[in-house]
Amino acid sequence: MPDSVKRDYRAVSYTLASCVIGLIFTRILVYFAALPDDTYGQSLAGDALFTILTQVVFFAAVPFCIYKFYGKRNVKQVFSFSSAGKFKSYYLLAIPLGAAVFFVTVGVSALWTSLLKLTGYTVSSSSTPMPENFVFGFFLVDIILTAVLPAVCEEFCMRGGLLTTAQNTFKTVGCIVLCGIAFGLFHQNIRQVFYTSLFGALAAFIVIKTKSIYPAMLMHFTNNFCSVFIDYADNYDWAIGGGFYRFINEIGLFPLILLFLAVAAFGTFMIMLMLYIRDKRVIKKKMQALSDSAFDATNKRVVLMGEFDARRVEKLEMEKEVYGKDYSRPLYKPEPRDIMVIVALGVVTILTTVFTYVWGFFY
């Protein structure tokens, strides 16, 4: 493996440290700042301080600088490293997928919370009530803080360079599991750790299969947008979305299970449709490349015309055709130092997550 891969592992370990330590630092800062939250506007101000520091600084700006300067990349290469290439129209299918994911997440979160309650965990609700009359400015700020910034910054960090680097060591299943666990633990909150792990695994799967971070961003944005929208719709009794949680509580268990399965099936269909459209485009590009290529009958391999370019082979996804059907991507074993850093960060996130269960610390 080239030295750049070793450098990427070091960069990713620094990036994860930025996320974990930055989140703890910000929570301590906001806690001791003791910002007033008597009104919804004041509460949003505190949320803005927390979110901008964590999302913009520790999940986006710091990782970007690490990938650029330590990773020795220009701006375009940083985005390419984070799977942020050309946007394709079929990525928009991730929007209805995100709506389906929101509904499924509500069910998974409710089930997880119920299990926690059975263990004696007390669910606290200290959120500031919304104003009596709807304020569009508050709604817009909520959307930015809850949907826009996390969708961009968290995906850039967790399904960007981290996933790209992990693919040098793990196969698809390993990358999905790793990214799922990392995303769940990085929230450092016992109530969020389970469903966010599932969400992180799904997002990693989509990025791996589409080779783009944009579908995960759109899915993430839509999921979080639905959460904010439903909260406002419920509070102000909007025609669309109003009474959503009341409907969920009153529909009955069996119809709810059927609805849950139907929505999950719809989300699965959206994923399959997205991948089907992508595969058609990949096959079309392969056919175009093959029309100008030769075939090595002895070794049963395709020989692309022109000067050999490994990046072109990878872009066309023709590794099997060019290198042979038995080709498998060489995997890199990280150095002990990098493994120790990542393990240490994992231990820290596990401890802070446990703290939120035992003492409500950093909640």
Image (cartoon, rainbow, N blue to C red):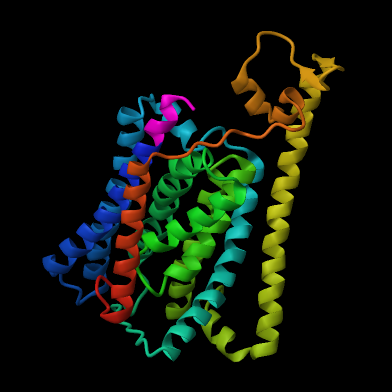
Q: Residue furthest top?
A: 306
Above or below, 223 against 153 in this view is below
Q: Which of 350 and 244 is in front in this view?
A: 350
Q: Is residue 59 visible?
A: no
Relative to 163, residue 116 above or below = below
Residue 2 highlighted magenta (yes or no): yes
Q: Is residue 31 visible?
A: yes
Residue occupying image coordinates x 72% and y 28%: 318
Q: What stretch is highlighted in magenta?
A: 1-8
Residue 100 image point, x, y percent: 62, 65
Q: How many marks?
A: 0
| Vertical order, 80 against 247 (above or below) | above
Where is residue 217? Give x, y as percent.
50, 49
- Tell which of 12 and 316 is nearer to you: 12
Could you say where residue 2 lies in the image, as x and y percent from the top left?
46, 25
Residue 264: which quarter of the image?
A: bottom right
Q: Position of residue 331 (x, y in %)?
A: 55, 37
